Structures are given as C-alpha cells and as structure tokens.
Image: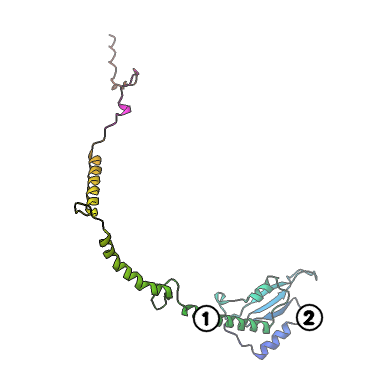
C-alpha cells in the first residue's frame, strides 16, 4: 500500500478546515493515508440544525477514478454505520495488521506445501509414506503368490481313467456352449399380424374413385 506523505503546510490547512465554525456549511472530517479527504456538509437551502450532515469523499486530482481505494473504516463512516471517523493511528495500525496477515499466510502456505500430499502415489517425493505393516507384508504376499501354482498342481484331482478334472470341465463347457449356439440359430416362429385379418365391414375396403368430368349437356337448337 502506497502512503502519500503530507507536507506541513497541508497539515495546517487540514486543521483549519476541520474547525467547526458556526458560519461554515462544510468542514473536514479527516483524511486517509492515500491523500483522500472526507468532508461533512449541509445541502444549500436547508437550515434545520437537527438535520443530518451529508458525507462525501474527495480524491486528489492526479488520481484516476479506477485507482481510488477506500478503506473499510472510511466506508463505514460514509455509510453512517460509524459515528466517529477513523484516526491516523488507527489507519496505520490496520495497515500493519494487513501486512502481518500476508506474512503469516505465506508461512502457512509454505508449511502446507512441505507436508506430504495424501493424493500422490506412495513412494514418490511428496507421496504418503507406506505403513510399516504394509512394508512387512509385501514380501510375504509375493512368496505366497509364487507358491500358489505349485500347490494347485499338487492338489488337482484326477479321475480313475487318468484324465484330469479340468479337461472334463472343459468338455462340459464346450457342449453347453454348442447347445446355446444351436438354440440361438433356430428360426423363431413368425407371429401372425393382427392387422392383416380380413375386415368385415362393407365400408372398410372402400376407396375413392378418380374424378371424372360430367358429359356436356346437348345444345338446344
């Protein structure tokens, strides 16, 4: 945030304009750290002393309208949600607080980035470390997987005639598959179309005839 330096002459002028003299209809309420001045005034033609004063902000002539920024404290004062205008000490403390919050937010982001991510795959640079129990079970599972084919070959039952049970199962599956294909290839019986039945009404088969012009009438002699 850029803070404009105020010259001593401008400070004296601000103090003079802030005096609430009886003949004044507009006086200075305060200024912010960017050089914006805030005023209270009465509309011309209203002499009611109990009437509410209007509040307005004046920007420096060198500031573009798109670059104007008003602090939340002055926003509250302009909208009559704050009675007293904020002081210079309060505005400076708010700037220090904002800078401190930025530093703390950057430190929190750095700490969060340094932690291992739970979404990354295990074993990567930022991945979640594998549990100790899972690391111990991994070689045991690998040895069990290698020993399974041998155990299956030893426990495979054989029939009395010397053929394996797996071969018998394969023959049964091939027969069932052939039977299913034969059932699919059989033609399905065609169902009679109910709309093709003979219609019994005499007018149902009537069709309009082509138009024929009437014969010309004979001329009278």
Give, as a single range, the part of the protein colored magenta: 189-201
Q: Residues within 10 Å of mark 2 (few under 14, many from 20)?
A: few
* Residue at x 66% of width, y 76% of height: 73
Q: Main secondary structure of the magenta part?
A: loop
According to the image, label 2 marks what residue? Answer: 21
Q: Where's the C terminus, which quadrant?
A: top left
- Nearer to me, 175 or 100: 175
Which callout, 2 or 1, points to the residue nearer the camera?
A: 1
Q: Farthest residue in the top direction?
A: 221
Q: Is residue 193 above or below residue 175?
A: above
In this rendering, would 27 be left or right of 199?
right
Q: Is residue 186 above or below residue 61?
A: above
* Residue at x 47% of width, y 78% of height: 113
In this rendering, would 168 be left or right of 16?
left
- Nearer to me, 111 or 216: 111
Which x, y percent locates residue 11? Answer: 68, 87
Number of numbered discs visible in the structure rendering: 2
């Amino acid at each position: 945030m850029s803070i404009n330096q105020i010259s001593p002459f401008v400070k004296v002028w601000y103090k003079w304009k802030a005096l609430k003299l009886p003949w004044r209809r507009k006086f200075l309420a305060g200024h912010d750290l960017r050089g914006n001045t805030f005023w209270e005034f009465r509309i011309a033609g209203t002499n009611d002393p109990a009437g509410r004063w209007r509040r307005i902000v004046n920007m420096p002539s060198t500031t573009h309208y798109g670059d104007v920024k008003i602090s939340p404290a002055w926003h509250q004062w302009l909208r009559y949600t704050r009675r007293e205008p904020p002081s210079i000490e309060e505005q400076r403390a708010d700037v220090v607080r904002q800078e401190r919050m930025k530093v703390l937010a950057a430190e929190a982001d750095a700490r969060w980035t340094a932690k291992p991510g739970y979404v990354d795959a295990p074993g990567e640079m930022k991945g979640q470390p594998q549990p100790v129990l899972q690391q111990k079970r991994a070689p045991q599972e690998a040895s069990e997987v290698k020993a399974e084919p041998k155990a299956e070959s030893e426990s495979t039952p054989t029939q009395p005639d010397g053929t394996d049970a797996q071969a018998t199962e394969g023959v049964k599956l091939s027969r069932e598959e052939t039977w299913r294909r034969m059932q699919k290839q059989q033609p399905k019986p065609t169902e009679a179309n109910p709309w093709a039945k003979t219609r019994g009404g005499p007018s149902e088969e009537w069709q309009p005839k082509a138009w024929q012009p009437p014969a010309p009438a004979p001329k009278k002699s």
